[in-house]
Amino acid sequence: ELGGADHIGTDFVRDFEFAMTRPSFTYGMRYFIRRDLSAAGTFAYGWLRGADNRTNEPIRNNRNLQFRSPLAELSLRLEYALMTEKRGHRYSLKKVRGQSGNRFIPCVYAGLGLFWFNPRAKDINQLGTGKWYSLRKIGTEGQFVTTTRKPYPQVGISPQVGLYAKWLINRRWNIAIDLGARWTGTDYMDDVSTTYADPEKIAENTKYEDIPPELAKWFADPSLLQDNKTGINQQRGDARDDDSYMFGFITLCYRLKTGRDGWPIFKFGY
């Protein structure tokens, strides 16, 4: 819900803002069930970022919310190769070992991930401390002062789909591009979902020992213009659509030696 294009908030990639992308990395292993079907387990870690001061849409810019969050994901997925790898003699010359046939292998995949996040915001205006604070602990939408709102979970399940394309360098190595989308089932990855709560009550009930009440109040409503555009029960986010995120990776893969049963062979010692 934060930042985005220069118009009223829209869904998914229509509101994508490239300047807010952040680095990520991944590590995983893949097992081939058959030549065109494989199962992959991966661990990914990255960061999410969003800020209303990046958009020129006046109402969103005036809202002035911002966040960053670490994002960790464990996933398991099935990959289907649209073209299969062919091995043989390079250049069709006998005894010249290498790859022949398809060296570019496009794949599609689907799976499930277990993810964790923790949205934070920086004190950039109110007290000028420059510190980052956990927004969930503050309860910026009244989670600790309104009986109908409860603190949101920081762990969830994310269905995912994507495209995976690899280029075979040789029999052991390949390089690949992985692009995938995830749906989360939560609307609080950016700590924004519903309406404004009473910032005075939030300031009085903050559970942060090292945050002054006026700073908790400011995180709940940092609007540039305190007028009728913001206020208790006024729209702060859009609870009709849950959050989603995307990963894009460039990966380098090494094929382990396997036995006749298809499982990797591990040798220890010298």
Image: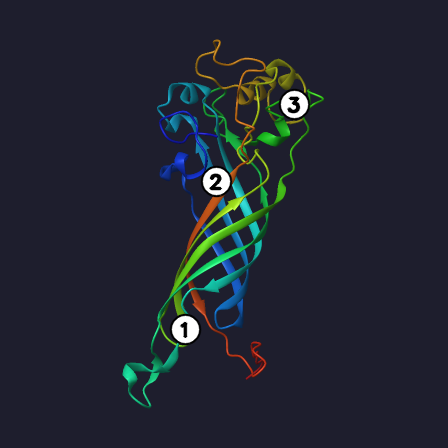
> 132 or 44, which lies in front?
44
Q: Secondary structure at mark 2?
A: strand
The part of the image, by quadrant, that contains residue 207 is top right
Q: Nearer the viewer, mark 3 or mark 2?
A: 2
Disc 3 versus disc 2: distance between alpha carbons?
Answer: 25 Å
> 133 or 246, which lies in front?
246
Residue identifier under label 3: 206
For the residue marked with disc 3, what is the amino acid?
A: Thr
- Judge from the rendering whether residue 137 lies leftward or rightward of residue 69; answer left or right: right
**Circle 2 crowding by C-alpha within 10 Å: few under 14, some 14–19, many from 20:** many
Residue that extends furthest to the top in the rendered view of this protein: 227
User: On residue 85, which mark appears?
Assistant: 1
Decide which of tag 1 and tag 3 comes sooner along the chain: 1
Q: Nearer the viewer, mark 1 or mark 3?
A: 1
Disc 2 versus disc 1: distance between alpha carbons?
Answer: 36 Å
Disc 1 versus disc 3: distance between alpha carbons?
Answer: 58 Å
Q: Identify the residue at horizontal 51%, vertical 67% (top origin).
A: 37
User: On residue 37, which mark appears?
Assistant: none
Decide which of tag 2 and tag 1 comes sooner along the chain: 2
Q: Secondary structure at mark 1?
A: loop
Q: Secondary structure at mark 3?
A: loop
Q: Identify the residue at horizontal 38%, vertical 29% (top origin).
A: 54
x, y percentage for residue 215? 55, 21
Q: Identify the residue at horizontal 41%, vertical 41% (top origin).
A: 21
Residue 72 against residue 255 in the figure, above or below? above
Residue 38 against residue 244 in the figure, above or below? below
Q: Identify the residue at horizontal 62%, vertical 39% (top origin).
A: 154
